[in-house]
């Protein structure tokens, strides 16, 4: 579903799992792929499993009063903090 392709791309990048493209070559969303890469073409990826930040641990994300889901991970060999907020 094209409505969620940006969110899925960012979640895959933050997840610590593989980042892959399954679209046919003529339908690849190049603007989304640019979000996941540096200017030199290296891919930004997280080596660990992403974790919710403390404020989200005991909250039901499906509750109408829920705060946005916030995830934490580290990026590549540099261990640069990487966060994602989804709401």
Image (cartoon, rainbow, N blue to C red):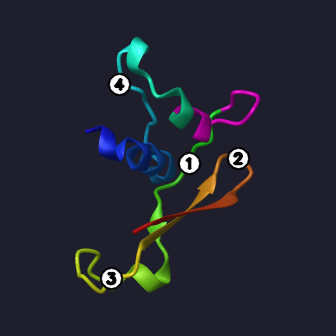
Q: Is residue 50 visible?
A: yes
Task: Identify the residue at the far top of this view.
Answer: 26
Give the residue at mark 3.
Answer: 66
Question: Which range is magenta?
Answer: 33-42
Give the residue at mark 1.
Answer: 47
Mark found first going from the N terminus, 3 or 2: 3
Give the residue at mark 4.
Answer: 22
Tell me: 2 left or right of 50: left
3 is higher (above) or lower (below) than 53: above
Q: Position of residue 7 (x, y in %)?
A: 41, 50
Is 9 a magenta residue?
no
Q: Position of residue 35 (x, y in %)?
A: 59, 41
- The residue sitting at 47% across, 60% down in the picture is 50
Pointer 4: residues within 10 angstroms few (<14), some, or many (20+)? few
Give the residue at mark 2.
Answer: 77
Mark found first going from the N terminus, 3 or 4: 4
Mark found first going from the N terminus, 1 or 2: 1
């Amino acid at each position: 579903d094209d409505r969620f392709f940006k969110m899925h791309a960012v979640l895959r990048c933050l997840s610590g799992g593989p980042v892959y493209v399954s679209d046919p070559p003529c339908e690849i969303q190049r603007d989304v792929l640019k979000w996941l890469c540096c200017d030199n073409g290296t891919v930004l990826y997280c080596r660990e499993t992403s974790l919710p930040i403390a404020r989200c641990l005991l909250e039901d994300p499906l509750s109408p009063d829920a705060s946005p889901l916030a995830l934490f991970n580290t990026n590549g060999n540099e261990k640069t903090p990487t966060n994602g907020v989804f709401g």
